Image: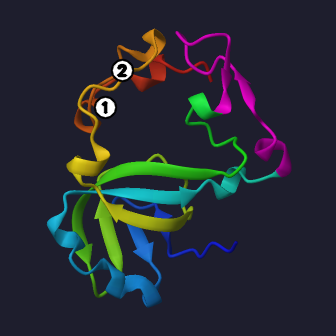
Amino acid sequence: MQLKEIGKINVEEKDMFLQINKEYVKGLQGLEDFSHIDLIWWFDKCDNDKNRGVTEVNQPYKKAPKKLGIFSTRSPERPNPIALSITEITHIDYDKGRIYITYIDAMNNSKILDIKPYTPSIDRVEKPNVPNWCSHWPLSYEESGYFDWENEFLF
């Protein structure tokens, strides 16, 4: 199995953007009509044998159980450090191969593996079940921007 990086995430400058490699820019055609994308990227700054061996973590969230399995978290420590983020597109510069976005919780120069358009008929679950310890979290991407996330984590 071989993964190909299609670009990098830029979070250093005032504007956050996805810099798409030249050979994949044509693949962006039609994306401008979508407001959001699902971005699949690599937690490359956390990719090491130790982190890939983690299967259980101590309580990462204040209201969570004392131990959680790694697949019950969004931690970068996992067997395959793949990340999934939904982000809003502000505009696309096809000439520069850039997708400008509102926010992403990634480190600068993280590798982009894939981009998919966010479509509510496939990506949205209207009434998901979640554990009690996180049931007070926002119900949408939009509400998350106003939520006090720093008060949720133990690190």
Q: Amino acid at mark 2?
A: Trp
| Number of other residues with Cα within 10 Å of mark 1, as a class: few under 14, some 14 to 19, many 20 or more | few
Q: Which disc, if any, is residue 144?
A: 1
- Magenta segment, which residues? 49-70
Residue depicted at 42% across the width and 25% down the height: 149
| Residue at the outermost left position | 33
What is the x, y in percent for residue 45?
Answer: 68, 54
Q: CA distance from mark 1 to mark 2?
A: 8 Å
- Left or right relative to 146: residue 112: right
What is the x, y in percent for residue 55?
Answer: 75, 33
Whether residue 10 is situated above or below residue 106 in the rendered picture? below
What is the x, y in percent for residue 19?
Answer: 43, 74
> Which residue is under mark 2?
137
Q: Quadrant of residue 33?
A: bottom left
Q: Nearer the viewer, mark 1 or mark 2?
A: 2
Q: Is residue 114 magenta?
A: no
Q: Are marks 1 and 2 in contact (CB under 8 Å)?
A: yes
| Number of other residues with Cα within 10 Å of mark 2, as a class: few under 14, some 14 to 19, many 20 or more | some
- Residue 11 at least partly seen: no
Whether residue 112 is situated above or below residue 70 in the rendered picture? below
Residue depicted at 59% across the width and 76% down the height: 4
Element carrying mark 2:
loop
Element carrying mark 1:
helix
| Residue at the outermost right position | 49
- Residue 151 at least partly seen: yes
- Left or right relative to 107: residue 36: left
What is the x, y in percent for residue 77?
Answer: 69, 41
Q: Earlier in the sequence, mark 1 or mark 2?
A: 2
Report the front residue among 31 and 61: 31
Q: Quadrant of residue 137?
A: top left
Q: Amino acid at mark 1?
A: Ser
